[in-house]
Amino acid sequence: MKNYDHKKIEKKWQGEWDKSKIYEAKTGAKGKRFYGLIEFPYPSGAGLHVGHIRSNTAMDIITRKRRMEGYNVLYPIGWDAFGLPTENYAIKTGIQPAKVTKINTDTFRKQLKSVGFGFDWSKEIDTTNPAYYKWTQWIFLQMFKKGLAYKTKTEINWCPSCKIGLANEEVVGGLCDRCGGPTGKKEKEQWMLAITKYADRLDKDLDEVNYLEKIKIQQRNWIGKSEGSEIEFNIQDSSEKIKVFTTRADTILGATYTVLAPDHELVNKLKSQITNWIEVENYIKEVKDKPEIERTAEDKIKTGVELKGVVAINPANKKEISIWIADYVLSTYGTGAIMAVPMHDERDREFALKFNLPILDEPFIDAKEITEKVGGKIVTKYKLRDWVFSRQRYWGEPIPIIHCENCGYVPVPEKDLPVILPKVKSYTPTDNGESPLASISKWVNTTCPKCKGKAKRETDTMPNWAGSSWYFLRYTDPKNNKELASKKALSYWMKEGVDWYNGGMEHTTLHLLYSRFWHKFLYDIKVVPTSEPYMKRTSHGMILAEGGVKMSKSIGNTIDPKDIVSSYGADTLRIYEMFMGPFDQAVTWSTESIIGSRRFLDKIWRIGESKISDDVKLNKDFQTLLHKTIKKISSDIETMSFNTAISSMMVFVNEMERIESISKSDFKMFLQILAPFAPHLTEELWNHTGEKSSIHKSSWPKYNPKKIIEDTIKIAVQINGKVRTEILIGVDLNEEEIKSQVLKDEVLIPWLENKEIKRFIYVKGRIVNIVV
RNA sequence: GCCCGAGUGGCGGAACUGGUAUACGCGCACGACUUAAAAUCGUGUCUCGUAAGGGAUGUGGGUUCGAUUCCCACCUCGGGCACCA
């Protein structure tokens, strides 16, 4: 008997699959189709890590099962290759980012193939390929034309020591992700995308999709829809009014002062009436210079200044109340002004106590009525902000806009797309926070497409969320140079959206939300057939290093899948990662435990090599177990309960070891249900049974419901809720028959002697409980 | 502070709509095979007790014939948001 030589087997079948292209999807094919998607990886220099394998294997299992169920399956892969790590690497080494990306994607491709994923490699995409980002730029231009992309002066994160602008993701807890120093804000012109115009639909349409509930909740919280009233407070001796937003109009009688955000426009308008202007001006400056880390600190103490000389009128009771500015009121939410009700609001109370403001316990009144009475209106507000879309960075898609002195912002004509990212000498952002592209005058200086006059190119690039906001569309038709994808391909694969998308929880409020936004826009301009991109969204848990801490290169506790594939095999790694624990929860890596998964496959190999016989007498219990196992695996895959699926296959394998011999047909059925988990081993053993075509093209076995029914079953007998014995009963017996059988049971006699039976409970097929 | 999720053996974890808690795997112990080791196979492995039996699913209550599962209060850990009016 040959040993299970994983290296030989895995290499052999990976080559065969490549050659026969068995995983290629056929666009337009008749019958059922299925689009399974995973988040495409960022090809970092560190190579593939075990976390990629966990999520990829899960969707690989699902798509392999779908294929065996007769679906035309699309399971594509590509590279989300724009991004900071590559750029930083280029800054350090001087090697072109495009070159680094090529090296890294080659490594990733090789590694992914070595794990045996059934990707359709003919549809591979790369967001940094000009043929791809042409369409990323095209979508941006459509948004620009519809007024959804606009440039505005806004505050960006700024690291004073690195002298560069930082993306939100680069600011961790108020500190610079690069140097660890404190960050501040800097005003800068930025391209923005008006995602807030879609806030309502992004919230409401979550009702239509099958996402895990926690994902919906997190998105809803992020969008932050809240309904309330906008009410105007008059200012005494002024034509100006303070418009406040409140969700508690019913508490308006208790409003004892109002607060404006320090940068509220009204503050300047009231300047001439304010008697303590110097104090006010100092406070505004102080707030502006406050580092981010202090403003958001846990135990921050409320600060603020009264605007002396001006007084507001509470419209509900006409009482005069003071006006304040304080940084606990944000200019970016609601109207940037509040009515303070210290009796019912924690923050207002804290502020009132500090500044000795009145705290009045007034009765509640009807919110809707009072809003109408004082001339306010019911409004809906969102926490969601427009998306800062500019990066002063090199390694991203150039924003296809030309600045003309006469015509303003002019879109690059579509025929001139893509705007190719030019090669530069230095990738370091400039001292004043401009993108490195700004220093290439040859590229920057151009002519206006409209008036043909002198003009300059936009030098900001897009964030790395741009390319990933629509990539799943490109997979359907990756080589199209006329459209982002053909109508035919989109109406075939995206008819109802991506069928199943699995990814990380960390992308819930970024990538997932951004791509829903883009998709809705594309739906509005009739490019895609659905308003939601993904029908179903699930998420995987992280893999932690031994000891339960995050895997990180700097700590040196990462696991290289390459080593596991080499010493145990890809199939063992796949089984192990699926067996580790519940798929949606974080699990701790344990190299010690991998051996269990390898032993499982070793046993199957040995059974396949020595126990298969054509002449096997019918074993009813074994048949029952086989069909129960098929049933369980079939449903466990659908619920992503991969760990329990594997454990029940282990039970089955243990049973195969116990019995004399197994018929070829039974063994083949088992190989088929294992095939999505361990594609190489099962292909090899399937081949040994004499099959000529791939197991992955065979049909998913159906369990026989008749074979699952047992004649006799073992049930527990309890007395007063405590298990005393087990009995074998016929499944068809009724309660009376069981009762007479149970009362005759010798073991139970001492428990029942001289006792009165108060109740006899029989739960069909499960349990008997006697209350005495 | 608010919103999610989770607390079960030495460890990872299982238990369907309330019905035999600890499946499956790792580790450990003993045994078989072997000159020996590895590999493999077998047996055992929550806890107290010689046993009969008792006690255990974060803690304390409740509902129920019966609770890991449902309800209430609390504790701990993980994740997200964070002065959002």
Image (cartoon, rainbow, N blue to C red):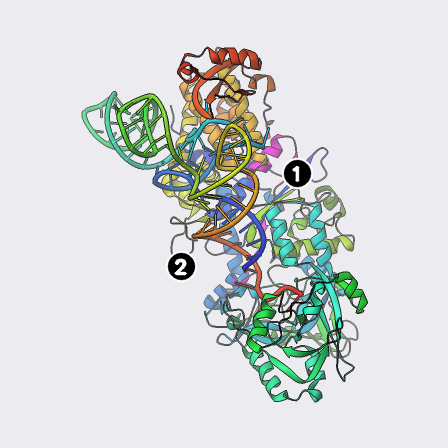
Marking on residue A768? none
The residue drawn where x is 48% and y is 64% is A89
Secondary-structure class at tag 1: strand
Q: Is residue A114 above or below residue A104?
A: above
For disc 1, the chain is: A
> Which range of residues does the magenta coloring cover?
A59-84
Q: Of helix, strand and loop, which one carries label 2?
A: loop
Q: Depth check: B81 or B24 in front?
A: B81
Placement of A114 over or under A126, stated as above or below = above
| Amino acid type shown at disc 1 | Phe
Q: Position of residue A23 (x, y in %)?
A: 60, 37
Q: Is residue A424 left or right of residue A416?
A: left
Q: Identify the subunit bearing mark 2.
A: A
- x, y percent for residue A474: 67, 50
- The answer to which of A349 and A701 lies nearer the viewer is A349
Residue A61: in magenta span: yes
Residue A743 included in the magenta stretch of the image: no
Number of the label disc, if any, that sits on residue A554: 2
Marks 1 and 2 sit apart, C-alpha to C-alpha, by: 40 Å
Q: Position of residue A156 (x, y in %)?
A: 59, 72
Residue A34 is labelled as 1
Give the mark nearest the N terminus, 1 or 2.
1
Which of the pair A315/A679 is nearer the observer?
A: A315
**Residue A768 image position (x, y, % from top left):** 51, 20
Indicate the quadrant containing the N terminus of chain A: top left, top right, bottom left or bottom right: top left
Q: Is residue A469 visible?
A: no
* Residue A84 to residue A320: above or below: above
Q: How many residues crowd mark 2 within 10 Å: few (<14), some (14–19), many (20+)?
A: few
Q: Residue at x 75, y 61 (%)?
A: A366
Question: Which quadrant of the figure has residue A747?
Answer: top left
Q: Disc 2 residue type?
A: Ser
